[in-house]
């Protein structure tokens, strides 16, 4: 008998928390991002379903969100509030078994080997009772299937995806419908004549490995076949990195100033690294040029470190790789941890 994995995903989590705090916003388009001022530069953190109907989504510039949905209510990001509600949700999920936290608003739950759909509905009821939030639950024979099933169940539904239904549901979809395949990888696969999940699944792993590498190639074929781990780990979630970004209300033309901002961000990131009590092993710098083109570069550190000067020096070295010296609207520095 199969053991089942559930993927629990809170619907429009951040927006939903804000609506709970301000019930008068229910049913209205709500956009959360930056300091809540859409006239400033910044990006959308989340949008309610009502706002999404107007084309507003996460990562969209706030000013564009205002143009698309001028009647929306814009609110600032309140991280402590979301973290507190998330903790309540995860505590509720642990009533049902082992929970693997993926972020504020999603987690895997080991559903055991009986009645996963019934467990999913009980989870929805308990989360609603404990927090007044709605969630969607994906059911699968492994974590990949459960994660993808959630997308078909939104909002507030339960959807099951198994080996038996895998190709019926996903076979004709583009490869980037798979969890783990992004736009760049999908383009590389398309260059090989592989456009759909079914085409990837039926390609010999060695063929994909020749283009994508000996590890990534076979893994891509496995996930196209719906094969993945079913182990749900209850170990505490550890961040893979810590990063800081700053959007500037005026473009920075002077790259000496860009360097100073990178140092400032690197010191802020180092404070997060120290708080994490885990040394950084790699530094990544992100530059978003005006109007909105983004580029990133990174480098491995000579040795793991939590030293601010070492991380700042590495960030400046990475900055030298940006040969395009156009005006800048956003900068970011990320410190990555070892496994």
Image (cartoon, rainbow, N blue to C red):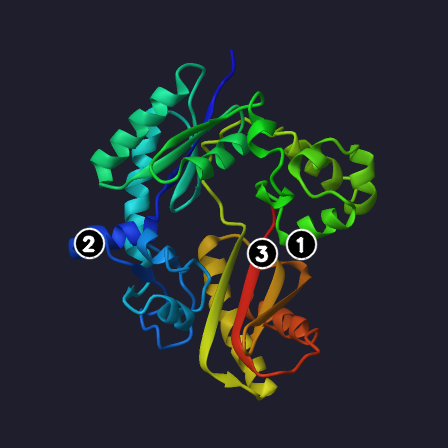
Does residue 100 appear anywhere in the picture?
no
- Image point (34%, 66%), residue name: 69
Q: Earlier in the sequence, mark 3 or mark 2?
A: 2
Crowding at label 1, few (<14), some or many (≥20) Cα neighbours within 10 Å? few
Q: Nearer the viewer, mark 3 or mark 1?
A: 1
Quadrant in the picture for residue 93: top left
Q: Is residue 7 left or right of residue 129?
A: right
Q: CA distance from mark 3 to mark 1?
A: 22 Å
Crowding at label 2, few (<14), some or many (≥20) Cα neighbours within 10 Å? few
- Image point (62%, 36%), residue name: 172
Q: Nearer the viewer, residue 239 or 167?
A: 167
Q: Is residue 20 above or below residue 77?
A: above
Local secondary structure at mark 2: helix
Q: Is residue 66 above or below residue 79?
A: below
Please give the residue where the numbered disc 2 appears in the rendered image: 21
Q: Is residue 182 left or right of residue 248?
A: right
Please give the residue where the numbered disc 1 appears in the rendered image: 184
Local secondary structure at mark 1: helix
Q: What percent of the width, then of the height, locates residue 87?
A: 31, 43
Marking on residue 116:
none
Q: What percent of the width, then of the height, locates residue 186?
A: 67, 49
């Amino acid at each position: 008998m199969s053991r089942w994995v559930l993927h629990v995903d809170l619907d429009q989590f951040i927006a939903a928390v804000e609506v709970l705090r301000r019930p008068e916003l229910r049913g209205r388009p709500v956009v959360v991002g930056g300091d809540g001022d859409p006239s400033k530069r910044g990006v959308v953190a989340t949008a309610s379903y009502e706002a999404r109907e107007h084309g507003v989504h996460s990562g969209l510039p706030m000013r564009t969100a205002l143009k698309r949905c001028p009647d929306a209510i814009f609110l600032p990001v309140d991280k402590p509030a979301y973290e507190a509600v998330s903790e309540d949700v995860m505590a509720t999920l642990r009533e049902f078994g082992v929970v693997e936290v993926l972020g504020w608003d999603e987690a895997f739950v080991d559903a055991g080997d009986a009645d996963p759909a019934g467990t999913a509905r009980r989870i929805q009821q308990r989360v609603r009772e404990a927090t007044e939030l709605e969630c969607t639950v994906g059911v699968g024979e492994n974590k990949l299937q459960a994660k993808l099933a959630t997308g078909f169940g939104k909002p507030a539904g339960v959807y099951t995806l198994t080996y038996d239904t895998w190709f019926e549901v996903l076979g004709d979809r583009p490869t980037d419908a798979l969890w783990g395949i992004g736009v760049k990888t999908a383009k590389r696969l398309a260059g090989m004549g592989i456009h759909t999940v079914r085409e990837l699944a039926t390609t010999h792993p060695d063929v994909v490995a020749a283009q994508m590498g000996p590890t990534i190639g076979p893994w891509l074929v496995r996930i196209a076949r719906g094969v993945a781990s079913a182990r749900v780990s209850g170990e505490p979630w550890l961040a893979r990195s810590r990063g800081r970004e700053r959007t500037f209300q005026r473009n920075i033309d002077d790259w000496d100033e860009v360097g100073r901002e990178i140092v400032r961000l690197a010191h802020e990131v180092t404070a997060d690294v120290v708080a994490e009590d885990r040394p950084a092993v790699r530094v990544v710098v992100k530059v978003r040029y005006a109007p909105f083109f983004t580029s990133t570069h990174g480098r491995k550190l000579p040795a793991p470190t939590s030293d601010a000067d070492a991380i700042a020096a590495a960030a400046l070295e990475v900055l030298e790789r940006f040969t395009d010296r156009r005006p800048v609207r956003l900068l970011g520095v990320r410190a990555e941890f070892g496994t």
